[in-house]
């Protein structure tokens, strides 16, 4: 709520300082005295734009400062998001320099007008003729029905679950999009794994193939070597075996002194003859097989290609790569299972949300008839007997943040005029009264910001104005209300009454504001009832209004 408004050097206001009641503050004064100027100054700290035309003294800056108590509005997160210092007593200041430069401050921290405007929406609900009223906002309309149905906690619970469901749905959408990518990835991985499985490489196979290929590639050389071995050792005229036999005989004749070498020569002869015989056998077994050589070469080429394809250093790494691919495919399968589990959870949560939304919708529909009736009664009480107010609630198939409903408040002020959506109707005094009627009905259940009404009593007087004053007074028991009014009946209901007037000196005219009490207040109200000075009857009537305020 607003506690204080200080204005300096604005329009015809040199300086005023207004303290507000926590309940109902009424502001009165003659036409042109400056009431609308006060609203304009207030608009500056609510984020409206201004220029140097508003300066009282053209060589001095204009300052408008408001002090607000905001503890009940739960605005700490807003202050954190905008890098502002939070304090339950919030000071909003706007300065306009003679150069035309405008600055805005929240708790002495410079800020942008856009931030100021957002904050003002939380603390001041300003109703002026031709303003757009918040009663056309869908969120407010839902809040109204839910307050009347006493189901705010149920709706908050639904909204919390809905947000979680939305996040799960977003996650599912992402996973499904990734699944399409994974399908392509899986196909590629499976293709690679199939290639490796088809190759069926075993550890050490490359070495064996290499040895086999080398043998097949050197068959003639091997045959020549094998035959030469037998020839040189056993078959040639001066073969090695016969030479060794001669040496052995000579060492044998030498006696015991050469026995060691004799035995060694015998062993060498035996080994060489064995080698010769084995070489002959090998020579018989070695045959050139071009088909086998081609098979081995093709096999090695297939292994080499996959090794390079997978950027592996050794052929034996193919086995490890195959295991990696199997692991990756298993992981993809696990992720698909996870996606399926998430989809199941979402379906279950959606079913619960639909049931909860249907329950909320049923409760809303139940309060609509009585709500329409009460609004009609209050509109009639404020001199709108032909006004039509209806609530249209339609159920939808899709889950929404507020349930499964679409809501529209429709309104017509004049007899015979079709009712239309509030947001499609130009606002004015009639819509201000509609807002007053609606908000007075739900005031105890919805935490509203400070409500300010300007010229809400336009065109009404007498008993109608008195009833409007009673509604405003009743509304102020739950919320701070500020009313700029020409009605004595409404002004008499105020807990605090300000009078706006002009003073003129030799140089210029300026606006003054003073709080009225006692006889001064009765005199001002009597003047509104008759003339200045008021008649005795008007004074008596004014005192009666003050004595019988609710």
Image (cartoon, rainbow, N blue to C red):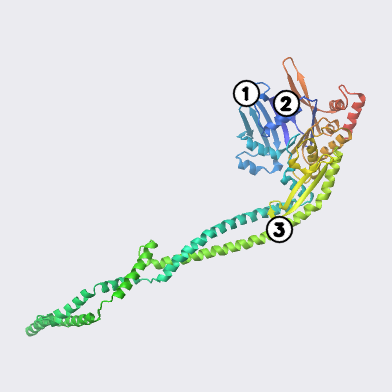
Q: Which residue is mark 3?
A: 354
Q: In front: 524, or 22? A: 524
Residue at image point 70% right, 57% down: 353
Q: Which residue is mark 2?
A: 16
| Furthest-right residue in this view | 537
Residue 136 in the image: x percent, y percent?
74, 42
Residue at image point 84% right, 45% down: 374
Distance from Cα at disc 3 to Cα at disc 2: 55 Å
Q: Which residue is mark 1?
A: 98
Q: In front: 433, or 386? A: 386
Q: Residues within 10 Å of mark 1 (few under 14, many from 20)?
A: some
The image shows a total of numbered marks equal to: 3
Q: Can residue 242 be spotted in the picture? A: yes
Residue 519 in the image: x percent, y percent?
86, 26
Front tag of 1 and 2: 1
Distance from Cα at disc 1 to Cα at disc 2: 20 Å
Q: Residues within 10 Å of mark 2 (few under 14, many from 20)?
A: some
């Amino acid at each position: 709520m607003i506690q204080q408004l200080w204005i300096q050097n604005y329009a015809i206001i040199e300086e005023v300082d207004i303290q507000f009641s926590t309940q109902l503050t009424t502001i009165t004064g003659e036409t042109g005295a400056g009431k609308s100027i006060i609203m304009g100054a207030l608009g500056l700290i609510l984020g409206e734009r201004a220029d140097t035309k508003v300066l009282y003294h053209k060589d001095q800056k204009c300052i408008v400062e408001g002090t607000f108590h905001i503890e009940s509005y739960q605005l700490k997160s807003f202050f954190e998001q905008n890098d502002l210092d939070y304090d339950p007593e919030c000071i909003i200041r706007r300065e306009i320099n003679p150069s035309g430069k405008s600055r805005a401050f929240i708790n002495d921290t410079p800020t942008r007008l856009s931030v100021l405007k957002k904050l003002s929406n939380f603390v001041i609900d300003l109703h002026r003729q031709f303003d757009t009223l918040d009663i056309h906002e869908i969120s407010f309309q839902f809040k109204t029905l839910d307050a009347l149905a006493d189901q705010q906690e149920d709706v908050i619970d639904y909204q919390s679950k809905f947000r979680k469901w939305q996040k799960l749905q977003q996650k599912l959408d992402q996973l499904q999009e990734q699944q399409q990518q994974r399908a392509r990835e899986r196909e590629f991985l499976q293709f690679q794994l199939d290639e490796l499985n088809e190759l069926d490489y075993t550890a050490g196979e490359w070495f064996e193939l290499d040895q086999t290929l080398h043998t097949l590639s050197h068959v003639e050389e091997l045959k020549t070597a094998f035959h030469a071995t037998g020839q040189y050792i056993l078959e040639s005229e001066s073969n090695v075996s016969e030479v060794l036999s001669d040496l052995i005989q000579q060492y044998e004749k030498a006696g015991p002194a050469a026995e060691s070498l004799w035995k060694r020569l015998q062993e060498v002869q035996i080994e060489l003859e064995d080698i010769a015989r084995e070489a002959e056998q090998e020579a018989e077994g070695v045959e050139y097989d071009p088909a086998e050589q081609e098979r081995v070469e093709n096999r090695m080429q297939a292994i080499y290609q996959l090794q390079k394809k997978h950027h592996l250093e050794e052929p034996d790494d193919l086995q490890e790569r195959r295991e990696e691919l199997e692991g990756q495919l298993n992981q993809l399968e696990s992720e698909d299972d996870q996606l399926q589990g998430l989809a199941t959870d979402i379906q279950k949560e959606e079913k619960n949300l639909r049931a909860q939304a249907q329950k909320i919708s049923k409760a809303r529909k139940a309060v609509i008839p009585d709500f329409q009736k009460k609004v009609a009664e209050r509109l009639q009480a404020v001199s709108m007997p032909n006004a039509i107010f209806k609530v249209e609630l339609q159920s939808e198939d899709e889950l929404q943040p507020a349930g499964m409903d679409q809501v529209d408040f429709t309104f017509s002020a004049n007899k015979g005029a079709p009712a239309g959506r509030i947001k499609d109707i130009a606002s004015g005094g009639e819509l201000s009264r509609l807002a007053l009627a609606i908000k007075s009905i739900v005031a105890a259940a919805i935490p509203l910001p400070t409500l300010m009404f300007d010229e809400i009593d336009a065109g009404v007087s007498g008993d109608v104005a008195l009833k409007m004053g009673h509604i405003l007074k009743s509304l102020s028991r739950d919320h701070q209300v500020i009313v700029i009014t020409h009605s004595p009946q409404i002004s008499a209901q105020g807990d605090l009454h300000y009078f706006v007037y002009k003073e003129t000196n030799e140089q210029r005219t300026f606006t003054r504001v003073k709080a009225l009490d006692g006889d001064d207040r009765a005199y001002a109200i009597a003047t509104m009832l008759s003339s200045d000075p008021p008649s005795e009857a008007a004074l008596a009537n004014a005192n009666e209004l003050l004595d019988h305020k609710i």
